[in-house]
Image (cartoon, rainbow, N blue to C red):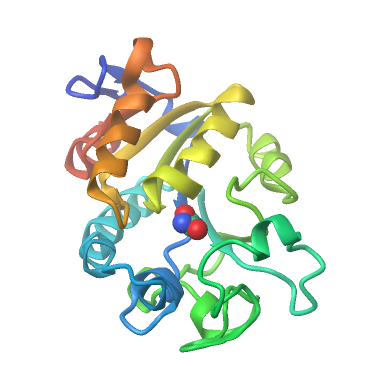
């Protein structure tokens, strides 16, 4: 069984035949200059910097024939799946559904909601549009993973403390072992990323493990 000896907080062993990769919300609106994230005043450069690492992780997982899931945070054009408790947050002049730099913000089918070209899903990979922060909420992700008898999830994507962490916690509650690729995830706030990595590993991997993309790729070759 592949084992990542250097994983934190302790070695992580997994059955590659029961493992899938989930890449969270690597969308143009969060990552590209001129998108929603930038319009909210965030520096998107740190998020853009993990694109090559995430591509390397995707490459390693594809080579190992792991099922791959890509998520996109976005809503129906009529906003029927976006409650006021979500839409009313953020900058008052730029809400979900408003016209933004890359089309309507976080709306399915708009250019900004697409995954960045370097990480575009391949034929046969599963793409999930999710209205929440967690990828299990109001989606069929759970059914998809159950059908494939998946027990372990490797995570990458943005942002570490919001959609990645929420989905890892949802997954952990559903009985999955969770491993986060620490150099293929990022936040607009460096202190939030490091706090999230610490929270995940704390108390004997209370949410899961972390490891580098290189360590994961090496283990997948075993
Ligand atoms: C945020 C996300 N940060 N994908 N979304 O609003 O983490």
Whether residue 183 is visible: yes
**Residue at the front extreme, as displayed:** 92
Q: Position of residue 131 (x, y in %)?
A: 67, 59
Q: Which residue is drawn at the image coordinates 40% and 78% (left, top)?
A: 39
Up-down: is 125 above or below 120?
Answer: above
Against 50, residue 76 (above or below) is below
Classify 11 as above or below 33: above
From the viewer's perspective, tell me whether residue 77 is left or right of residue 133: right
Write down the quadrant of residue 215 in the picture. top left
Quarter of the rendering occupied by the N terminus? top left
**Residue sitting at x 61%, y 24%:** 173
Residue 66 % position (x, y): 45, 45
Q: Residue 200: percent from the left, percent from the top?
A: 38, 26
The answer to which of 9 and 191 lies nearer the viewer is 191
Does any portion of residue 24 appear in the rendered image?
Answer: no
Q: How many marks?
A: 0
Residue at point 46% right, 72% down?
115
């Amino acid at each position: 069984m592949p084992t990542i000896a250097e994983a934190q907080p302790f070695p992580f062993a997994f059955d590659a035949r029961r493992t899938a990769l989930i890449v969270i919300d690597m969308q143009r609106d969060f990552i590209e200059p001129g998108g929603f994230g930038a319009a909210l005043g965030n520096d998107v450069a740190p998020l853009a910097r993990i694109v090559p690492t995430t591509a390397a992780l995707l490459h390693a997982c594809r080579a190992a024939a792991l099922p791959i899931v890509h998520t996109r945070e976005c809503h129906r054009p009529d906003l029927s799946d976006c409650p006021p408790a979500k839409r009313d947050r953020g900058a008052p002049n730029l809400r979900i559904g408003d016209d933004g730099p890359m089309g309507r913000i976080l709306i399915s089918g708009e250019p900004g909601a697409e995954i960045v070209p370097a990480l575009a899903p391949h034929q046969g990979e599963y793409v999930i549009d999710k209205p929440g922060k967690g990828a299990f909420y109001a989606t069929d992700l759970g059914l998809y993973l159950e059908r494939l008898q998946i027990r372990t999830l490797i995570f990458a994507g943005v942002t570490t403390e919001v959609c990645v962490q929420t989905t890892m916690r949802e997954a952990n509650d559903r009985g999955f072992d969770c491993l986060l690729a620490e150099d293929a995830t990022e936040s607009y706030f460096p202190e939030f990323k490091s706090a999230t990595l610490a929270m995940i590993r704390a108390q004997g991997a209370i949410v899961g493990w972390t490891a580098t993309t290189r360590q994961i790729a090496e283990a997948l070759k075993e």
